[in-house]
Amino acid sequence: MKNYEMVIGLEVHVELATKTKIFCGCTTQFGGLPNTHCCPVCMGMPGTLPVLNKKVVEFAVAAGLALGCEITRHCRFDRKNYFYPDIPKAYQISQLYLPICRNGGIEIETDTGKKRIGIHEIHMEEDAGKLVHDPWEDCTLVDYNRCGVPLIEIVSEPDMRSADEVIAYLEKLRLILKYLGVSDCKMQEGSLRADINLSVREVGAAAFGTRTEMKNMNSFKAIVRAIEGECKRQIEVLSNGGKVIQETRRWDENKDTSFAMRSKEDAQDYRYFPEPDLVPLVIDEDWLTRIKLREPELRDAKMKRYMEEFDIPAYDAAILTGAKRMADIFEETVAICGKPKEVSNWLMVETMRLLKETETDAEELALAPEKLAALIGMVDAGKINRTVAKEVFGKIFMEDADPEEYVKEKGLTMLQDDGLLREALSRVLAANKQSVADFLGGKDRAFGFLVGQMMKELKGKADPGMVNALLRDALASYQK
């Protein structure tokens, strides 16, 4: 039986985080009533003219530089002609002949080590509208709010050989774009969508097989299943003596299979020609330099710095930098309190736990650095113990509570009155004579139980160190 391998390339469509559309002043805000974020320009009305949004070019260049691309200093837009309801003017303004970025790549981690995935090009274009299929009325409606939203399309080389490599590439790409601030990359809102170009070939073969394309995949789960399903389908076709047809296919998540939509178009099918309503674009050295200077510290560099500057383990550094918002909170809190390991511990343990419990994305974390720093300072100063601190942290996370006010209001300041502690100790020892006997008989676990009873008696507000010391002294006196 022949052994096959996958060959995969991606076309990733990224909605840019500009406030207005690429060729008009309409808002790019997600949502809104259908067909309310439109104007004659993005609706393609006769006689209207596009005006290029400079921020779109800046974001495209920033993405290209971060992805190691060459920037095309003299580029232009092209008109891509096709008739489909989601493009009312029957053409899309895109780039074919002179894309703004070319010949880049990023490095991903695989089971066998690092691997470079080449980026063939990045081009700018306008998004299409959204088709809404209404099963009740048996018709298709069109919402043009998304028409004209600026996109960059990042076209990879066919360098990926598994679904795992595809996901690693997409995760790395998404993090870079989010760190740059050029897109929120919310797949559930369509801000990042991937077209999967996939073929199979015999292991060791030099030539590529015939590829198919699955369009507009917008979740990692669906992408993995689509890759595995399409690979299996193509292998079955070849194993049965058939030929794979180059075509565009639609992945049906419910049926766990893909269906043919149309034969795959080539560039000539779209009758591209230079966009007559937009002048060629010249990117001068000064502007390019200014964009380079504004590039933030990206995730890989930030991880390395955390390990070197703050002595943070590699695993922790990876978690802290896995979301830009988390990294920002870490750095801002450290700048206030000067305790990187304490900050890291709170973010790694309690924050991650609460994010999971509340199903909150780390990028949406609303944790004020000054409040986390204040909490750490209160623990360090002995005002509250760590048990109380966890309760307070939960209130900061969930309700944006002020830690000092909450501790004062709830009377959670740590008890350090020796007399009160000794009175509580006497009550606990009198009420738990069997546990005292068990400890004296060599059962060390009984000590932990007695500590717990002391903390319960004192409503969690005692200094655990003082409790341990007093309890050991009291039990030692029994042994004399």
Image (spheres, rainbow, N blue to C red):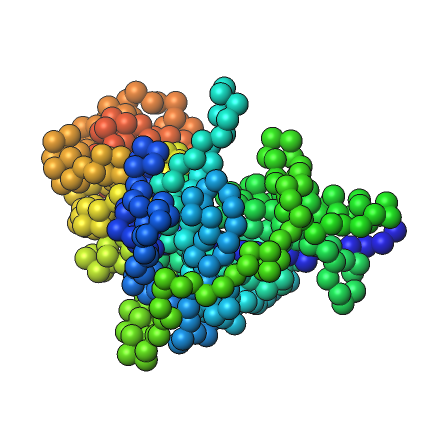
User: In this picture, is 309 found above or below 10?
Assistant: below
- 454 relative position to 370: left or right: right
The front one of 428 and 108 is 108
- 361 relative position to 417: left or right: right
Q: Residue 434: where, in percent of width, then height?
A: 39, 22
The front one of 219 and 440 is 219
User: In this picture, is 146 found above or below 332?
Assistant: above
Q: Which residue is at a point 52% across and 61% down the rendered structure image?
A: 272
Q: Residue 384: where, in percent of width, then height?
A: 20, 41
Q: Which residue is at a point 67% across and 41% down the rendered structure image?
A: 260
The front one of 182 and 76 is 76
Count of marks overlaid on the render? 0
As drawn, the residue found furthest toward the bottom would be: 285
Q: Is residue 274 visible?
A: yes
Q: Which residue is at a point 29% across and 63% down the rendered structure image?
A: 54
Q: Which residue is at a point 49% across and 60% down the rendered structure image?
A: 154
User: In this picture, is 274 found above or below 469?
Assistant: below
